[in-house]
Amino acid sequence: MKPFDFRVEHRYYAEYSKSSRSACKKCKSNIDKGELRLAIMVQNRFSDRQQPDWHHFDCFFKTYHPPSTADIGHFNNLKFDDQKKIESMIETQPANNASDFSVEYAKSGKSKCKLCEELIPKNEVRISKLDAEADMGYGPVKRWFHVDCFVSSRNELEFQLSGDKIPDYSMLEDKDQKMIRNKLPSLSRKHKAQKENGSEAAKRPKDDDEIALKKQSDLLYNHISEIEKMKRTDIVRLLEYNNQHVP
C-alpha cells in the first residue's frame, strides 16, 4: 500500500490507522490501529500546507457529507466492504443533514452573504450552513446566505431536501414559508426515481463487476495480511527477487 500522499489534492481521505496514537477530531478518543478512519483536510496553522483531521467512521459522517467517493482520496485502496459502507453513507446522508442548516430573519444588517459577499439587510430571510472546516475549537461556524444565493448554490452546499425541512422554518411568516417552499423543492425524490428506473439488464453487469472487484480486493488484502506476518529480511529477499525497490 502506498503511504499517505499529502501532494494529492482531495478534500477528504480514507485509510486504515497505522497506529493507535491518532485521536478522533470529534470525540477525542483514540482510533485503533488498523481501524478505518476518514479525514477532512484543513489548513495547517503554522505553514502553508494542509493536514488531515482524522475521525472514526461514524464520527466523520456525523459532521461531513462528501458529495461522492471521487472526493475521497485513497478510496480505491480500501477493502471492498469498507468501500460499500462509505458509498452507502454518501447515498443516504443528504436525507439526514437538515441540522447543518437553519433559516431566520437577519438580526442586523451586519452579516455578509458567503456567496456574493454583500450584506444581508436586517429582517431579510437568510439561510445558513454549518462550516465544519472553520471549526476554531468551539464548533462549526454558521455561514449565511441570501435566499437566492443559497438556491443557486444548493448542489455545492449539498442541500437535497425541501425548504420546509430546514430547522426554524416554522418560525417564519406564512408568506416567507411559501417563498422558501417554492424556491427549494426537494431534489431527493427525483434522484430516487432515476435510481429506481434502472432496468434489471443494466444492473446485472454492475453486479458482475462488483463480484469481480470484491474478489480482487479480498485477494489483495489476503496478500497484505500474509506479508505483515513476514520478517523484514524475508520481505527484502522477496522484493529483490521480483526486481522491486527496497525502501
Image (cartoon, rainbow, N blue to C red):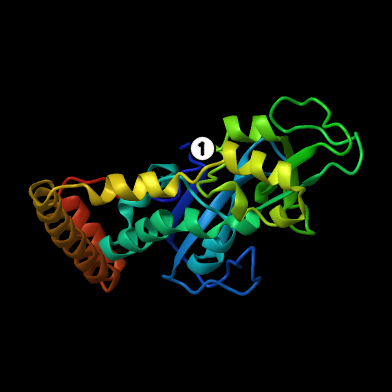
Residue 66 spot, x, y in % from top left = 48, 48
Q: Is residue 48 above or below residue 102?
A: above
Residue 28 spot, x, y in % from top left = 66, 71
Q: Determine whether, in the image, residue 169 is placed left or right of residue 73.
A: right
- In the image, 27 versus 143, the foreground residue is 143
> Element at badge 1?
loop
Residue 79 spot, x, y in % from top left = 29, 62
- In the image, 134 versus 196, the foreground residue is 196
Q: Residue at x 49, y 74 (%)?
A: 32
Q: Determine whether, in the image, residue 221 is placed left or right of residue 164.
A: left
Q: Is residue 178 above or below residue 207?
A: above
Q: Name the kind of residue labelled 1 in the image.
A: Asn
Locate the N terminus by quadrant. Answer: bottom left
Q: What residue did someone put label 1 on?
A: 155
Whether residue 69 is visible: no
| Residue 64 in which image quadrant | bottom right
The number of numbered badges drawn on the structure is 1
| Residue 187 in which image quadrant | top left
Q: Determine whether, in the image, residue 238 is placed left or right of residue 113.
A: left
Q: Residue at x 68, y 44 (%)?
A: 44
- In the image, 153 versus 171, the foreground residue is 171
Residue 247 spot, x, y in % from top left = 35, 50
- Crowdedness of circle 1 by 10 Å Cα count: few (<14), some, many (20+)? few
Whether residue 51 is visible: yes
Q: Residue at x 14, y 51 (%)?
A: 203
Q: Determine whether, in the image, residue 110 is placed left or right of residue 182.
A: right
